[in-house]
Each structure stands twice: as structure tokens, then as C-alpha cells.
Image (cartoon, rainbow, N blue to C red):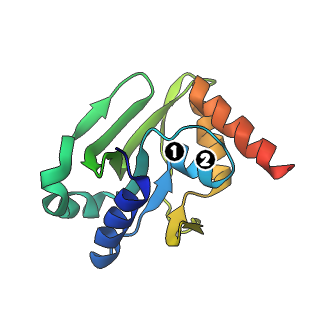
Amino acid sequence: MRNTEAALRWIVTILEKMHIPFEIDGGFAAKMYGEDRELADIDINIPLNDFHRLIPFVTEYIIYGPKQYKDDNWDLLMTSIKYSGQTIDISALGKTKYFNQKEQKWVDFPEDLSEVRIMDYKGIKIPVINEVKLMIYKTELGRGVDKKDVKGMIGSLFK
């Protein structure tokens, strides 16, 4: 059974204790901005210089990586963790690119963590990627799930 709240609380506690800046990204971020789809995983971006420092603290929960992952949409240094039934994908900023479908080229993922929005999820204060950055990269990625996320986020603005 998946417990998203417990997993989020666990990883946020570790990141805060280690003074690692981070942002919640992907589908979880879209949900925080109003999209209402089932959550697959929790995507977290952290600075490259903190990525390898974090690994020893999560090793027993790693299900993938840490290593460079590349598919048709993403090229990133990442590790996947499973805690309390919830998958958490942690990516290293500075080593992350995505494929812009409109321009048909690889683009560097924005590294700036200074424009996050501090939001509340069940009493947990979390830094969430800026909604404009989120909508821009999801629009450029152009996958079905990204289009759904952007549509849901825009729709929630007019409720």
C-alpha cells in the first residue's frame, strides 16, 4: 500500500536535516497547482553538488541508480527510491535535459531553485517548482500526461 504522505515526510526530513535545497516537480507539483490525476511518483530536483552526498542516506531504499538515465524525453542523473510503497525520483540539477518537441532539440532543465513556491501538503511545507516554469517545460515536452497537467493547472485557475 502506497503512503505518499509518509514518503514525502521522510524524504523532506532528510533533505532538511542535510540542508539540501530542493523542489518538488512533475505530476506532484501539477497536483499542487490543481491538476487532479493519480500520482505516479514524487519528483524532486536537488543541486548536483548535493546529489552524491544524499545517496548514502537513502541507499537501502534505492530501486534504480544512481546513474544517468536517457529516453526520448529525458536525459538526467537520477536515482529512484521506494519508501512506504511510494516511488520518489531524485534528479540532479545541472545534469538534466529534456526534449523540446516543438523545437526538436534537447534543452537544459532550469537549475534555479530561488523561485519555488512554498506550499502545504497535509501539514508538510514543501518547495514546489514555480508554476510558470512547470507549465513551460511540460508544454515543451508535449507528452500526453504533460498536456493533461497543463490543462488541469490552467483549469484550476478559473474555478
Which residue is labeled 1 in the image?
26
Q: Is residue 157 left or right of residue 132?
A: right
What element does badge 2 sit on? Answer: helix
- Classify 32 as above or below 41: below
Q: Is residue 158 left or right of residue 132?
A: right
Residue at 81% from the left image edge and 51% from the top image edge: 157
Q: Is residue 142 visible?
A: no
Quadrant where the N terminus sits is top left
What element does badge 1 sit on? Answer: helix
- Classify 100 as above or below 114: above
Residue at 51% from the left image edge and 66% from the top image edge: 127
- The location of residue 7, given as percent across then percent down, is 35, 57
Closest to the observer, 79 or 155: 155
Residue at 27% from the left image edge and 75% from the top image edge: 18
Closest to the observer, 146 or 120: 120
Residue at the far front: name it. Answer: 1
- The location of residue 44, given as percent across then percent down, is 41, 53
Residue at 51% from the left image edge and 26% from the top image edge: 105
Which residue is labeled 2 in the image?
30
Mark 2 is on which residue type? Ala
Mark 1 is on which residue type? Gly
Q: Is residue 40 left or right of residue 149?
A: left
- The location of residue 8, given as percent across then percent down, is 40, 60
CA gap between label 1 and label 2 equals: 6 Å
- Classify 146 as above or below 82: above
- Classify 137 as above or below 50: above
- The location of residue 152, given as percent across then percent down, is 72, 40
Count neighbours of disc 2 (C-alpha within 10 A) and say few if under 14, some if 14 to 19, many if 20 or more: many
Q: Dividing the picture into quarters, in which one does residue 77 lie?
A: top left
